[in-house]
Amino acid sequence: MIHLKTDTANLLHSNPELYAVFESDKSFEMARFIHAILQKYETGRKVLDVGSGLGREVAFLSERGYDAVGIDASEDMVAWSQKNYPSAAFYTGQQAVFDLNQTFDALICVGSTFLYNFTNEDARLALMNFRKHLKDGGVLYLDMRNAAFFLTKEGQRWLTDELLEEAIFDGEPAIVKTRFYIDLARQVLKRDYNWKIGARDAIIEHLEHRLFFPQEIAGLLSVNSFKVIELFDKPEPHINSFSDGQPFEFGYELSGRRLQVIAKAI
């Protein structure tokens, strides 16, 4: 039986094997989309992935000739990445304070990693650090939950219904039930998880994410030495398929589940 760390602030981030089951991306859709962005904007080959998680994007880009580096706040995720992709470079660090003493042609921060910046000051410091690690004219790609989504009918349903996900983990059924709430004063998405994994005791978890609206994130970027190039919600490689050669058709309605930004360092 795979040992699970349960006395932790974030179950998935402390258990990469479980994360790999519930956040499966076997076709590397996000990595393919990132690769397409790097090609479209003709970046150089040095790429930094902030919040690299399981290391999939770093590994995918490295195999295609990029000098890709990953950094993540979770020591467990970094250890997993180093074990599974030993030829790539991974480091442990926090968004606002890591210092790699080098600059990159592109920086990516996907999977809602940026939403762990709970205050405007947190976000400002993180963006300042991102800019510090980018060359002039370097490309920044952010992908995160979209606050505006929760103003739509579908988003409202997420706030009233219990969501259910099922998978097989360690040969046993794994079920997680989720309820979402919004702390309006703090602009924070609160997530209550009820995990039942095989014969193990139930695990109750309470997590939070900051929420940013489209114009809010654009404003933060503009005052922290970035120029927004694209602000969009489609395509959604984090939750839908994206294949090599798929044409870029950005969606600008900005009511979808994902808020995405491409910006340049100025």
Image (cartoon, rainbow, N blue to C red):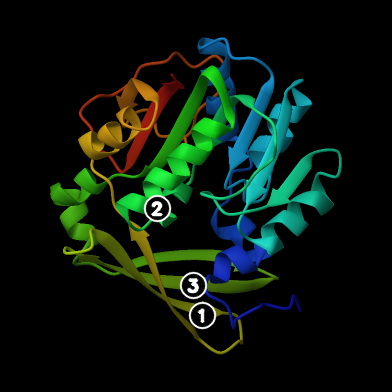
Label 3: which residue? Answer: 175
Circle 2 SS class: helix
Residue under circle 2?
A: 122
Instruction: Give the quadrant of the C terminus.
Output: top left
For disc 1, the marked residue is: 196
Label 3 with label 1: CB-CB less than 8 Å? yes
Q: Are marks 1 and 2 in contact (CB under 8 Å)?
A: no
- Residue 150's place in the image compared with 142, above or below, is below
Task: Give residue 111's position: percent from left, percent from top.
Answer: 48, 46
Image quarter where the N terminus lies is: bottom right
Earlier-in-chain disc, 2 versus 3:
2
Looking at the image, residue 24 lies above or below residue 218? below
Q: Which mark is residue 12?
A: none
Tag count in the figure?
A: 3
Q: Amino acid at mark 2?
A: Asp
Q: Is residue 65 left or right of residue 223?
A: right
Apparent side of residue 140 relative to residue 43 in the rendered image (left or right): left
Residue 190: quadrant of the picture: bottom left
Alpha-carbon span between mark 1 and mark 2: 34 Å
**Secondary structure at numbered mark 1:** strand
Q: Of helix, strand and loop, which one carries label 3?
A: strand
The correct choice, above or below, for 138 with respect to 101 in the image is: above
Would you say 98 lies left or right of 241 here?
Answer: right
Q: Earlier in the sequence, mark 1 or mark 2?
A: 2
Quarter where residue 64 is shown: top right
